[in-house]
Image (cartoon, rainbow, N blue to C red):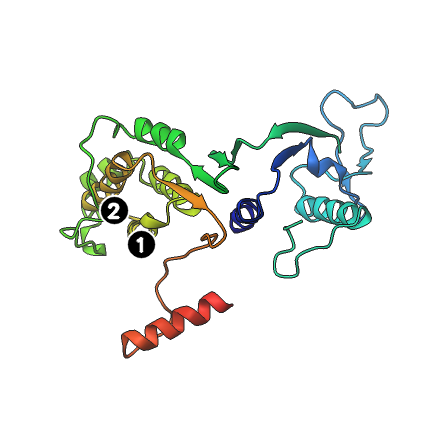
Amino acid sequence: MSTIRLVLGMVAAENLHLEQLDVKTAFLHGDLEEDLYMIHPEGFIVQGQENLVCKLRRSLYGLKQAPRQWYNKFDSFMHRIGFKRCEADHCCYFAMKDLGAAKQILGMRIIRDKTNGTLKLSQSEFVKKVLNRFNINEAKPVSTPLGSHFKLSKEQSPKTEEEMDHMSKVPYASAISSLMYVMVCTRSDIAHAVGVVSKFMNRPGKQHWETVKWILRYLKGSLDTYICFTGGTTISWASNLQKIVTLSTTEAEYVAATEVGK
């Protein structure tokens, strides 16, 4: 996601033309470096050759090396036509389908204003689908991503079989996954809140689920939030617990700055 935001930020800053392409069955174009064999696909077995296997000539979806081999093929092509790979991010640079001016990518809507030199990313449609999936579309919105009255701990996890059975029917993990995707793509404001509720993925309790619904209600009240890209835009963010115990806020900020520098 950081690479995508970096490219979009450059487009907005330099007022460049923005197009998008779709690589058809990309992983099938990778060249294999090893000898790999597979059993006959269903319906392709020839009588008398039941004990023979097929030798792969190209990569296939499902192979652990398929992403790497496709990347090698793509990297070779980009170098051949004169592109230079970014040293800090090797993903920043066959039939391809021209999709025209970029309007949407990975569930994010791209809103371009070339006159004012701005580019906006919005996930309002995706968030609406998430709210509808978890029955929050009629709930009352809230103004903060995490209410101060929530004091979450492992002690609030289910203790009886009845509580465990009830929580097993709650789509906690699915809701967290949706929130994480929104947070990673466009909503840095919910990073801390999502990090808090993610700690209880193994054994979520009723209070943990209420907190997740609170975050969803916050998104409901801020559907039209977006990231605006200009020259000095934010392309990456994180909200994590520091691995060491700091003795002051200044030291904590130095530790955070060091992590950013990495």
Where residue 150 appears, as percent x and y from the top left, is 17, 51
Mark 1 → mark 2, Cα distance in angstroms: 9 Å
In the picture, residue 47 is in which quadrant?
top right
Amino acid type for the residue under numbered disc 2: Pro
Q: Residue furthest left?
A: 149
Residue 196 rendering spot, x and y as whole percentages = 29, 53
Residue 159 shows in this picture:
yes
- Percent coordinates x, y for residue 67 in the rendering: 66, 45
Count neighbours of disc 1 (C-alpha within 10 A) and say few if under 14, some if 14 to 19, many if 20 or more.
Answer: some
Decide: is 182 above or below 51: below
- Name the residue located 32 percent from the left edge and 49 percent from the top edge: 189
Give the percent coordinates (x, y) of residue 216.
27, 38
Q: Secondary structure at mark 1?
A: helix
Q: Are marks 1 and 2 in contact (CB under 8 Å)?
A: yes
Among numbered discs 1 and 2, the one appearing first in the sequence: 2
150 left or right, relative to 104: left
Residue drawn at point x = 18 percent, y = 38 percent: 162
Residue position marked by numbered label 1 in the rendering: 192
Which residue is denoted by mark 2 in the rendering?
A: 145
- So how many labels did they put on this image? 2
Q: Which mark is residue 38?
A: none
Q: Residues within 10 Å of mark 2 (few under 14, many from 20)?
A: many
Which residue shows up at 39% across the image and 29% down it?
Answer: 125
Nearest the viewer among 44 and 209 is: 209
Question: What residue appears at the point 16 percent right and 53 percent down from the top-left corner?
Answer: 148
Q: Mark 2: which secondary structure?
A: loop
Amino acid under label 1? His
Q: Between 67 and 52, which is closer to the camera in this rendering?
A: 67
Seen from the viewer's position, the closer of residues 101 and 49 is: 101
From this viewpoint, which residue is outermost toward the front?
115
Residue 201 seen in the current view: no
